[in-house]
Amino acid sequence: MSKKIVISTDLNGDITEFIADERDSLLDALRERIGLTGVKEGCNNGNCGACAVLLDGILVNSCCVMAAEVDGGSVTTVEGIALENELHPVQQAFLNEAALQCGICTPGFLVAAKALLDTNPEPTEEEIRFWLAGNLCRCTGYDKIITAVQEASKSMQKK
Amino acid sequence: MVSTQKKADKTYKVIGTRPVRPDGLDKVTGRAKYGADIQLPGMLFGRVLRSPHAHAIIKKIDTSKALALPGVKSVITHKDLPTAADIALDLGETTSNMKWLCDKVLAAEKALFHGHAIAAVAAVDPHIAEDALALIDVEYEILEPVLSVHTAMDKKTPNIHPNMKTVDMIARFQAGEPSKVQINNVASILDLELGDLDAGFKEADIIIEREFETGTYHQGYIESHNGTAQWNENDEVTVWLSTQGHFNARDVLSKLLQVPMSKVKVIPMEIGGGFGGKIPMYMEPLAAIMSKQTGKPVKMHMQRDEVLLATGPTSATYIKVKVGAKNDGTIVAADAYLAYESGAYPGSPVGAGAASMFLPYNIANLRAHCLDVIVNKPHTAAYRAPGTPAAAFAIESIIDELAEKLEIDPITIRMHNAAEEGTRTSDGRLAPASLAVKELLEEAQATEHWNAELSDPSIGRGIAIGAWGNAGLESNAYASINSDGTINLNTGSVDIGGQRASLAMQLAETLGVDYDSIKPQVSDTDSIGYTAVTGGSRTTFASGIAVVEVGNKLKEQIIDRVATFWEIDASQVHYGDDGTLNGPEDKSIKFSGIGKILSRTGGTIQASATVKPNTQVATFGCHIVDVKVDEETGKVDILRSTALQDVGKAIHPAYVEGQIQGGILQGIGMALYEEYYYDDKGILKNASLLDYRMPTSYDVPFTETTLIEKPNPGHPFGVKGVGEVPIVPPLAAVANAIYNAVGVRPNILPVNPRRLSVLLKEKNKK
């Protein structure tokens, strides 16, 4: 039997302690140990971006981070990007622009788009396409996703 | 980005608007529950051991060491499956057979492809389940793999299934008697014929014959297959899964597990993409059997390499087409030979490809000879307009070449040969009603894109069209009106592309109520009648008809109740388009007030409808694309992309555009990037999403869309199925654009830099 470890991290703004298997990725731990199933598994190999989260403010694929690595750090998942009682502008824009179909890639895109807009509030189309190239979507052809991020950027400028 | 909509005449209140989807909020907040999100008390985690060989006799499986590992609760092999009966299964878009299906979920005597399931394990922890796989000893006798249609059909190649006979297909889904012609590893032959081929070719001034190949493509849904099963002591089974058809899953599970249908409850979770690939089942029967053995729920979730290795991709194809035309561009004869890999078991979509490839055209003399060929690769599954992108690539490439040789504009030559009312199709039937090939080509000709100058000689422009018919099949729906006037709508159709929205909108329009007053949901197999798969572009069309019928039945009941309440005759009650009911002496009540009347006249009401429409139509799509080719590297960049499609009536135009844009990009993936790489032993070398190269947002520009609305007479609002046809034209459109740019015609797709470099080198030698 492999070892179990106790991990403490700031998860979506609250200090959270959980027990994980030493072999668990952050993705495994979030989904199977904590129950934050908004984080999606698409490839478990760092290729599709469905499991994207912010680790200490930096965009990572949670399937490529060991759960043990987040001890003492901070993690933001799709469940934590909404503002109090209000969707994050990028979430609202995805709804308004019909930027999701099946929705399985959506959490990863939202976290990635938030990370982009946090550092580059007015990205060009080229910059959005380049930044989101680590997130695969098979339903939309990306058109409405790019438009949604552009709309979110505009609405954040107004505020 | 330009989005154009050529509107049909009639105006609607809800239809044609763009409301937010009912499942949207849960999907942007991470609350939506997909199959893999299921957590049940005491749940075990299942994994599958897969064959490392493409073709091998399974001599012995020893599971004792795996079973002895602490935490392992069950290990099963083929012998744990109930005995499989030899019965045909209609899966909606494709067919299978119970015997094949059982062998696919756990191999019996032979491993038939790299990744074939050999054994399954359930353990208390996913890591332990994985450890247990390494403890299962399998002794194989490795056989020579059969990896192409040409090798498979060679007289010297033994049959992969020794007892299989080549059968003649009577129609796309109907197998007939064993064929007079027996070809090794050919499961079936289908011949489509129209007119007199020889006479047709005699009339031709020009004949072009070309060979084409396309690779194995995967649907590439981002959610891997998953399934969780709980078998209880009354032999009732509950299954939570990701499927395009939960009734189809229930029926297959019932037959495979030998449990009555009423005792199998299938709960469809949110589905993370399917494109046809989530019609078949893989692990759900294994989860059910291991749950029966352990008494605990068992969850299974494929890893990505398993998805690529062992779930159904498309058929790789070999297609030879000969087309004869007169100097004025009239196509007088076309003859196609199509050999499609079906993978390890019969059932490729070769017939669908052959039937669809000529559908846009009026060609008097036609033949399509179709072969369904067994090879040592995973069993193919439906993928968006199954079989058709490859076939359309062939015919649309040849038509482009004809246009060039005859010095006719590529749109003009297509217009000249366009199918219309009264045209006969390749199987001799009349072309489907309200077909809009000419309207599509006229709109294409008028686009700004088609008329724009090309800015650089290394840039080329290509165009192609394609066809796909939408299926009818069975649908069930019911709705109830609550005492506050809100409405619950239940259907049996899995929502894969926004059906909850498109069906609620059709009910809202029928009843004259607000979209927001309707809550649509997908019902499980215990809660509504049989509904066929979400596939074949059928759901907004067929389930839409059911929903409209439900709406009309509710209206009748409402009128009766209001008449009772007002103490007048029902004929005196007028139900207005806005949901307001009027009667004599200024009697009037809005829909929102209906609830009170209902409760005073016998309680709330509900209505249900079962439909199986036979009024299928075909939809046609067009893709115009500009590419830039780097002649040094062979790399192709997409610079501009425009899609046009006849959609009948767009219920939710944004979702229709989304279907088109998504389909176009999958087609571009087939044209340029995606392909399975097998080595000479049949081992898949690129079973990851890094190496199986799907398009990213950085690969493409926006796709401009034009929606043409020529209503379908077989649907109350004119809906045609829109989901599949957009994947059809891009393969040839991109290939034709490459020719336009650099003067070489790609005949093998994907035309990646390696292949294009070879073609460019050959050209430069000449």
Image (cartoon, rainbow, N blue to C red):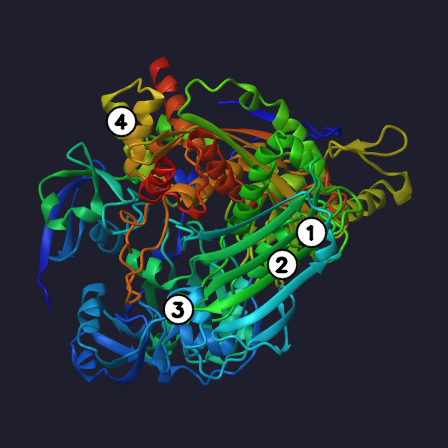
As shown in the figure, which amino acid type bears the numbered disc 1? Answer: Phe
Nearer the observer, disc 4 or disc 2?
A: 2
Query: Which residue is the site of mark 3?
Result: B229
Residues beneath discs 1 and 3 located on the same chain: yes
Q: Earlier in the sequence, mark 1 or mark 3?
A: 1
Q: Which residue is mark 2?
A: B368
Q: What secondary structure is found at the residue carrying circle 3?
A: strand
Q: Quadrant of residue B464?
A: top right
The answer for how far apart the CA atoms under marks 2 and 3 are is: 44 Å
Query: Is residue A155 rendered to the left or right of residue B723?
Result: left
**Residue at mark 4 shares a chain with residue at mark 1:** no
Q: Chain of mark 1?
A: B
- Residue at left offset 48%, top offset 79%: B99
User: Please, is residue B281 above or below residue B62 in the view?
Assistant: above
User: Within 10 Å of the Cα at label 2, are there few (<14), some (14-19), or many (20+) other Cα atoms?
Assistant: many
Q: CA distance from mark 3 to mark 4?
A: 40 Å
